[in-house]
Image (spheres, rainbow, N blue to C red):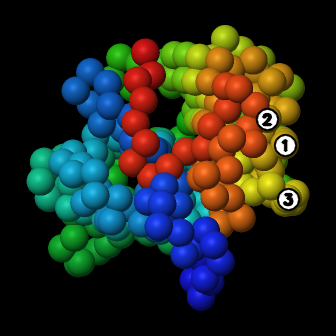
């Protein structure tokens, strides 16, 4: 947190050093990025990411999209236009704020980097079924994503009943668990636990954590629940 010297911001535990929430999925030699966080450049350098083959966007808030221009380096490497997938509302914001990335402005000489794809139902991506999961994010909406027995639900404070039905049978759930205290637009820890119990996920990892939560406090969580940390890896299938 900028300007803060609280115990978490001053912690020596590297798992308390958090960049903005994002996710990288590797399967069938393809690399799929979920959200272009403001810290994408730092994250890509840290994790030695060499290629991005597609991007899934959850919603259009700045912390999840403002690193979009850092996809330029990957485009330069493989000379391919990267497909991205998002809801109509999210694409509208992206196309308005970053039009130069999706189309060549007349006379600019800059070629497109991304190809926009609107999604409203499940679709196939590199041979894998991707199921978008509609979520409530305060008074707005976001999308989670399910791939096989895994789902990623960031930036949400409620899961519609129809979406809960799409989440049954999960082995691993990554879910928004902002902080211990309540928040109007995000699940707090208690809310994330309650949502996971409805879904009956075997393993639940809480992400989008604030500096209210120290990683060392993970022993306060019930069995089957844990905190995410930057650079965390796990096998999905």
Specify whether 22 is left or right of 47. right
Lower position in the chain sequence, tag 3 or tag 1: 3
Judging from the image, what secondary structure is the residue with disc 3 in? loop
| Numbered label attached to residue 181 | 3
Which residue occupies the foreground of this view, 221 or 89? 221
- In screen coordinates, is 123 left or right of 73? right
Q: Which of 59 and 4 is in front in this view?
A: 4
Dot 1 crowding, Cα within 10 Å, few <14, some 14–19, many 20+? some
Cβ atoms under marks 2 and 3 closer than 8 Å: no
Q: Which residue lies furthest to the top in this view?
A: 169
The label number, if any, that marks residue 227 in the structure image: none
- Residue at disc 1, secondary structure: helix
Q: Is 202 on the left or on the right of 11, as rendered?
A: right
Q: Residue at x 35, y 17 (%)?
A: 127
Cα gap from disc 3 to disc 1, whole angstroms: 9 Å
Q: Mark 2 points at which residue?
A: 193
Q: Where is residue 201 in the image (x, y as percent from the top left)?
A: 68, 20
Mark 1 = which residue?
A: 190
Q: Estimate the spatial distance between the alpha carbons at disc 2 and disc 3, rounded to whole Å.
A: 13 Å
**Where does residue 132 sit, x and y in percent of width and height?**
61, 31
| Front residue (pair 216, 130) | 216
| CA distance for labels 1 and 2 | 5 Å
Counting from the top left corner in percent of width and height, residue 222 is at 76, 31
In the rendered image, the vertical position of residue 120 relative to residue 124, given as above or below: below
> Marks 1 and 2: CB-CB under 8 Å?
yes
For residue 85, above or below residue 20: above
Residue sitting nearer the eye, 233 or 140:
233
């Amino acid at each position: 947190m900028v300007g803060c010297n609280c115990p978490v911001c001053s912690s020596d535990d590297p798992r308390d050093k958090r960049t903005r929430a994002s996710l990288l999925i590797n399967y069938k030699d393809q690399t799929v990025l979920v959200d272009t966080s403001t810290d994408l450049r730092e994250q890509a350098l840290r994790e030695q990411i060499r290629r991005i083959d597609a991007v899934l966007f959850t919603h259009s808030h700045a912390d999840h999209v403002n690193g979009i221009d850092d996809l330029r380096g990957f485009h330069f490497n493989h000379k391919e236009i990267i497909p991205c997938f998002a809801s109509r509302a999210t694409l509208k914001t992206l196309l308005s704020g970053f039009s130069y990335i999706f189309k060549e402005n007349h006379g600019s000489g800059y070629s497109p980097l991304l190809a926009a794809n609107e999604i409203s139902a499940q679709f196939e991506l590199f041979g894998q079924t991707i199921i978008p999961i509609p979520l409530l994010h305060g008074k707005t909406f976001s999308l989670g994503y399910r791939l096989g027995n895994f789902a990623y639900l960031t930036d949400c404070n409620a899961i519609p009943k129809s979406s809960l039905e799409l989440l049954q049978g999960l082995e691993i759930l990554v879910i928004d668990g902002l902080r211990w205290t309540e928040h109007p637009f995000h699940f707090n820890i208690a809310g994330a636990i309650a949502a996971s119990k409805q879904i009956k996920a075997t393993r639940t990892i809480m992400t989008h954590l604030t500096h209210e939560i120290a990683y060392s406090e993970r022993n306060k969580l019930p069995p089957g629940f844990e905190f995410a940390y930057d650079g965390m890896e796990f096998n999905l299938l």
